[in-house]
Amino acid sequence: MRDLAIVILNYNTRDLLADCLASLRRQSGLDFVTCVVDNCSTDGSADRVAAQFSEVTLIRSPENGGFAAGNNQGLRAFGFPDAPQARYAMLLNPDTVVPPGALSGMLAFADANPDVGVVGPKLMLMDGTLDMACRRSFPTPEVSFYRLIGLSKLFPHSRLFGRYNMTYLSIDQQTEVDSVVGACMLVRAEALKLAGLLDEQFFMYGEDLDWCLRVKQQRTPSGFPYRVMYYPAVTVQHVKRAASRKSAKAQYEFDRSMWLFYRKHYQRYTFFVMDWIVKLGLAWRGGPELTREMVRGKDV
């Protein structure tokens, strides 16, 4: 069995994808394979992969089915969840650059901590700041309320109000978190088998939160819950939103993902007054289209 299977979902990020794949060629010390799932790009991304990166498994998707569906194609190509070809799976965005030694460092940390189901590195943006999504708490109704009314921005160093992005912690502090981000996340094969693949009702955004929550609900062979860890000893560069920048659909899907996540995991336990506050807030953010979907009440 290989050490690692990497899945990269691409949509119209040809040059960034080439930089990402080139950075993977500079990795050493482990046995890994890479799959690029091209989500019906129109910029020649898939042809460039085929021409310049023959070692990469290329899947040309005939349609853009979204982040979860596309990544699941790649995971299935490597036998996940039931017959994995590697000890770990990694989701990696095409707009990332992985420095030498990063992959072996993340695997060494996971190997040394068998109760860790998911590991995420420190993701740094091009301006030198932290990608805040790389260490998060779940967006419970309480946490979401603090963000909605702006308390998380007013009091970023508060353990109460700054919980979602954990802004009260140093970016160099290794810590257990609720979720890391799908731009770069390492998942143990055993945990993935128990939790299952990404939930494809999430088109874009939220699926990583949902996946981490489901991993944390599973138990190791020793009977302990799996942990999700932020591991800042490894740093990965992230351009962020290279494929979705200035996209109205991306903003809508972000708001929609919060509705899906809330309805799937929290609504049934939420007092009706708070439930209405949450729904009104989501409807206000998401506009008429999301409001109509909420009223239709699709199963999740």
Image: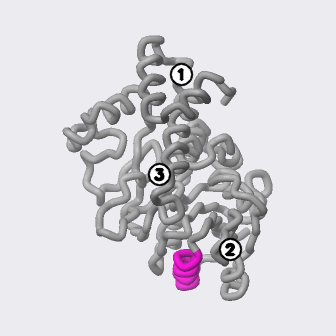
Earlier sequence position, callout 1 versus callout 3: 3
Alpha carbon separation for disc pair 1 and 3 = 23 Å
For residue 26, side relative to residue 69 (left or right):
left
Magenta part of the protein: which range? Answer: 14-29
Say which quarter of the image contains residue 194: top right
Q: Give x and y (percent) for residue 148.
A: 34, 33
Q: Which residue is painted at 41% across and 68% down in the image? A: 234
Q: Quick check: 176 above or below 189?
A: above
The answer to whether marks 1 and 3 mark residues whose Cβ atoms lie closer than 8 Å is: no
Amino acid at dot 1: Gln
Amino acid at dot 3: Val
Q: Quadrant of the C terminus?
A: top right
Which mark is on residue 180? 3
Q: Is residue 225 visible?
A: no
Residue position marked by numbered label 2 in the rendering: 33
Earlier sequence position, callout 1 versus callout 2: 2
Say which quarter of the image contains residue 91: bottom right
Q: Give x and y (percent) for residue 115.
A: 53, 48
In the image, 37 versus 12, the foreground residue is: 12
In the image, 128 versus 259, the foreground residue is: 259
Q: Which residue is painted at 74% across and 58% down in the image? A: 63
Q: Give x and y (percent) for residue 125.
A: 36, 66
- For mark 2, give the secondary structure: strand
Q: Quick check: 48 above or below 266?
A: below
Residue position marked by numbered label 1 in the rendering: 267
Earlier sequence position, callout 2 versus callout 3: 2
Q: Label 1: few (<14), some or many (≥20) within 10 Å?
A: many
- For mark 3, give the secondary structure: loop
- For mark 1, give the secondary structure: helix
Q: Quick check: 232 above or below 34?
A: above
